[in-house]
Amino acid sequence: MRPTNIADKFIRALLYCALPLLTLASCQRPGKSGAPGAATQAAATFDLEDVERAGELIAVTLSGPETYYTYRGQEMGLQYLMAERFTKSLGLGLRMEIAHDTTELLNMLSGAKADLIACPLPKTLVEKHGLIPVATQQGGRKAWAVRTTSPRLASTLITWWNPSLPDAITKQIETAKADITPATPNIRTAYLPQAKGRISPYDELFRTHGAKNGIDWRLLAAMAWQESAFNPTARSWAGARGLMQIMPATGARLGLTTAQLNEPDASIRGASAYLKQLYGKFSDINTPAERIKFAIAAYNAGPGHVRDAMRLTQKHKMSPQSWDRVAPFILKLSDARYYRDPAVKNGYMIGRETHDYVYAVLRHWQHFGGIVTGTGIGVSADLHSTPERATRKNRFTRNNRGLSPNDSVFQIE
């Protein structure tokens, strides 16, 4: 009898371990099992009630300025904002996926990798592929799409949709852009320190938090000047706030409340810690003087977009280790021919802003007493290709040694 008891115990233990796995598999979204035909079968039954159980709706779209993109970690774009408004009306989360072309859009929906196409397609194309047109736009010529096997989702969207919504949201965006405190320094008032020998009223905070994170305090000052012209109440059209123009979502990840973003100490503390994080994310850039440029770019655009530009640079047989080689591809990521390239994972970005931001910060940093490097592409001629010590004294550098990005004070462990 002893062998039988051991066998019984083994079977019970096996069932005990397998049961959670079977339960987990039954809760998966369609298309996750990997079994042939599983996605198609699941798609036949995956409707609004299933989306509600999952807690989020998955929408697929094409990246672009009018559809969907990310800016400083914030999701934006008209089609995204409308889809977000729909899911919020149902108390659901929204996950956006990016397709590279219309064929991939249609395949992702039919293959149950998405619940909704949130991109205005020709209505005739939607119907030709056996899908239900919803959220009709542009005089009824274009529409979103759902599967015919999701009738409840389709009917709910049709009932919720208001044809005036695109214009209403567009107007709200334009109003938000107009109703802001300017965050860009005026070139006519550049470099006006509060007192002789000082850069700003916040120099001690820059010094304190720069030292804690191994960052030249003059670089933090240069970023603050470019971000807000040293205005702690500045607010951008996208919602960035304070001296260092931190987005609320980024601030939350750094442990800062939205109110704290307007406090100089908290803003500089958060920005300094964030820049250190970004510097670490580009540890594959071998030269510290180059790596900091990538970190500055990521502070403005997010690391994902910078990585996209690096992949494009490498695809075009140039070195992704050099910012001056990568910078032109930052610009190209505003062009659909590039942001819809298969090598690009994060889609459209406002490339001109990030490109100019990096070079402006480098110029300010040098003016404040730091030494920056560059090969001359988009950089003023007095920036050196190899680190050098500053020899000319000015009211910011008198009695102070000029710093290079290679100095120990800037080495981030």
Image (cartoon, helix red, strand yellow):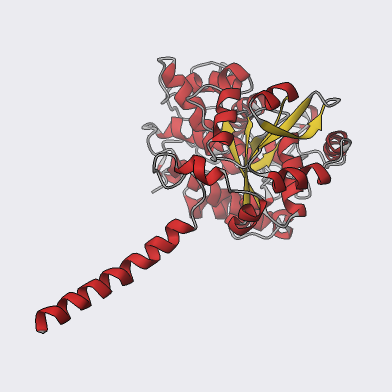
Q: Is residue 125 above or below residue 413?
A: above
Q: Is residue 319 above or below residue 151?
A: above
Front position in the image: 262 or 347 = 347
Left or right: 97, with 287 as reference point: right
The count of marks equals 0
Please state the horizontal and vertical placement of residue 87, each as a whole percent of the image.
Answer: 72, 50
Left or right: 238, with 299 as reference point: right
Examine the image and state in which quarter residue 301 appears.
top right
Q: Residue at x 41, y 43 (%)?
A: 411
Please state the horizontal and vertical placement of residue 108, each as a whole percent of the image.
Answer: 55, 34
Residue 332 visible to an observer of this rendering: yes
Please state the horizontal and vertical placement of residue 192, each as a whole percent of the image.
Answer: 75, 36
Examine the image and state in which quarter residue 188 appears.
top right
Of the 4 image quadrants, the one containing the N terminus is bottom left
Front position in the image: 41 or 277 = 41
Q: Residue at x 68, y 60 (%)?
A: 257
